[in-house]
Image (tube, rainbow, N blue to C red):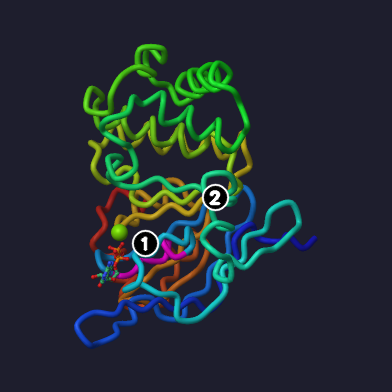
Amino acid sequence: MNITPVLDIRNLSVDFAGQGEVLRVVNNISLTVNPGETVGLVGESGSGKSVTSLAVMQLLQKPSGRIAEGEILLNINGTQTDLVKLKEEEVRRYRGKHMAMIFQEPMTSLNPVLTCGYQVAEALMLHEGLNKKQARERCIELFDHVKLPRPQAIYDAYPHQLSGGQKQRVMIAMAISCKPQLLIADEPTTALDVTVQKSIIELLGRLQQEYGMGIIFISHDLGVVSDIASRVAVMYKGKMVENATAADIFKNPQHPYTKGLLACRPQWISA
Ligand SMILES: Nc1ncnc2c1ncn2[C@@H]1O[C@H](COP(=O)(O)OP(=O)(O)O)[C@@H](O)[C@H]1O
Ligand SMILES: [Mg+2]
């Protein structure tokens, strides 16, 4: 049976223009994500992971950042749309509803002057057509679902009143509030300590099973990615140097950079 990927990135290149020169920071990469699949995207800092995800979300900083080439096909209920070709107002129909993103630093997305609950409820009113009361109820259910303690109190709390892990859970609740078919998690656990990191990864795994989302999980840490992803793509200096099942990457890495990543990983993971 042929599964149509929920996301099909074909030959994507992204340029940044600055001070008279144009830099190609993502260079001809292709990547697919099937429904219900977690693909890990690994690479050192500056390799182009975030730029790739921002390109998918059509959130590249304009006018300096620009998709130079390629297609980004999003498949929603059997209809494939090339996001690159859409106008901004058309993209807004997809972003938040069909594709969502979680960032490393929750404060990139949470507004410090609005309560956590209001921010999630607002998305529910906009995309799901709920009224204020329904949105509040649904938001509190979601907070409970992502295992936030005292969801009612968190509804009325401001982001700065929460711990890092709690803020990340609010972000996840916001990202999954409209049951997106695609979730991009860009180093969502990098700023958290190891135990919190583990519980967030477990949460994402559980939500994926439940919703059947395709997930791109980004990290600079191959060990973290191998905990959650069935397939791993490795980026190096804007290029995709490896794209294989997690098992193959560990058994038979092709690119010297991947071999290097494996060599510096702690011994206990190789068991
Ligand atoms: N807004 C920007 N303007 C110019 N260059 C950028 C911008 N954002 C990212 N870059 C460059 O693109 C490259 C890839 O960055 P990024 O995707 O953020 O890396 P990472 O893999 O760490 O997420 C880096 O060289 C970075 O300096
Ligand atoms: Mg990044």
Q: Residue furthest right?
A: 1
Q: Residue furthest left?
A: 19
Magenta residue check for 129: no
- The residue tagged 2 is 99
Tell me the quadrant of the picture where the N terminus can be found: bottom right
Q: Position of residue 72 (x, y in %)?
A: 56, 68
**Is residue 241 shown to the viewer in this render?**
no
Residue at 19%, 83% (x, y): give it.
19
Of label 1 and label 2, which has the lower sequence position? 1
Ligand 1's quadrant is bottom left
Left or right: where does residue 5 sit relative to residue 15?
Answer: right
User: What residue is shown at x 27% (from left), y 30% (from top)?
Assistant: 113
Query: Which numbered circle lies on residue 182?
Result: none
Label 1, on which residue?
42
Left or right? Give the position of 130 relative to 139: right
Residue 165 point in image, percent of width and height? 29, 31
Secondary structure beneath dot 2 equals strand
> Helix or strand or loop: what does disc 1 sit on?
strand
Q: Position of residue 120 (x, y in %)?
A: 45, 30
52 inside magenta stretch: yes
Which region is colored magenta?
A: 47-55
Q: Is residue 212 above or below residue 148?
A: below
Amino acid type at circle 1 is Val
Left or right: where 209 falls relative to 155? right
**Rendered location of residue 117, percent (x, y):** 41, 23
Label total for image = 2
